[in-house]
Image: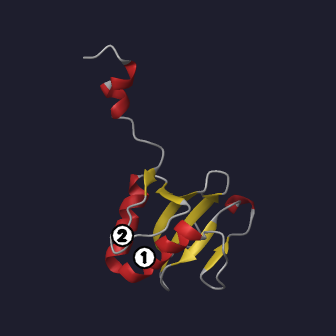
Amino acid sequence: MSDNPSENPIVENVEPPFVKLTATALKEIESIWLVVAKNRRVNRDWEALMQRHPENTLRCYEDLCTAPTTRQPGRVFPLKGKLYKGAWEYEVTKGDRVFYVPDKQQLKVIVYYAGKHPSPAPTP
């Protein structure tokens, strides 16, 4: 055991607040924004979505990396209401959605839901 506090094994077991969203390896994306999952469960749901709809999730990931706050009528838009302040919805397929909160200060997108279209929309 080291006396160096940065090598404390207990710290290594603490789950980070965000997990970098699993990126598809199909091609290199010129990323401006860092896209992260809120937690491991969200990343696992994202991976399942990639398995079901690889082309659509690749397009979603590219959009989140480059222009997450660009509206696309019927596909990408901010949610309304106090509960959803700052949250956006991305229609991956007719039945699948990604909900996220873009942080313009840090150029980071926090994905907090990926999967079947829920009703009502999940809150961040």
Q: Amino acid at mark 1?
A: Leu
- The C terminus sits in image quarter: bottom right
Up/down of 109 relative to 29, above or below: above
Give the image location of residue 80, x and y in percent.
Answer: 73, 69
Q: Earlier in the sequence, mark 1 or mark 2?
A: 2
Q: Are marks 1 and 2 in contact (CB under 8 Å)?
A: yes
Residue 111 in the image: x percent, y percent?
A: 52, 61
Q: Residue at x 63, y 68 (%)?
A: 88
Q: Is residue 53 visible?
A: no
Secondary structure under the numbered disc 2 in the rendered image: loop
Is residue 15 at all visible to an observer of this figure?
yes
Residue shown at 35% from the left, 17% from the top: 4
Q: Residue furthest top?
A: 3
Residue hosting label 2 = 24
The residue sitting at 49% across, 73% down in the picture is 62
Numbered disc 1: secondary structure: helix
Q: Is residue 85 above or below residue 95?
A: above
Query: Residue 82 appears in which quarter of the rendering?
Result: bottom right
Few, some or many C-alpha atoms within 10 Å of disc 1 (few <14, some 14-19, many ≥20)? some
Residue 96 numbered tag: none
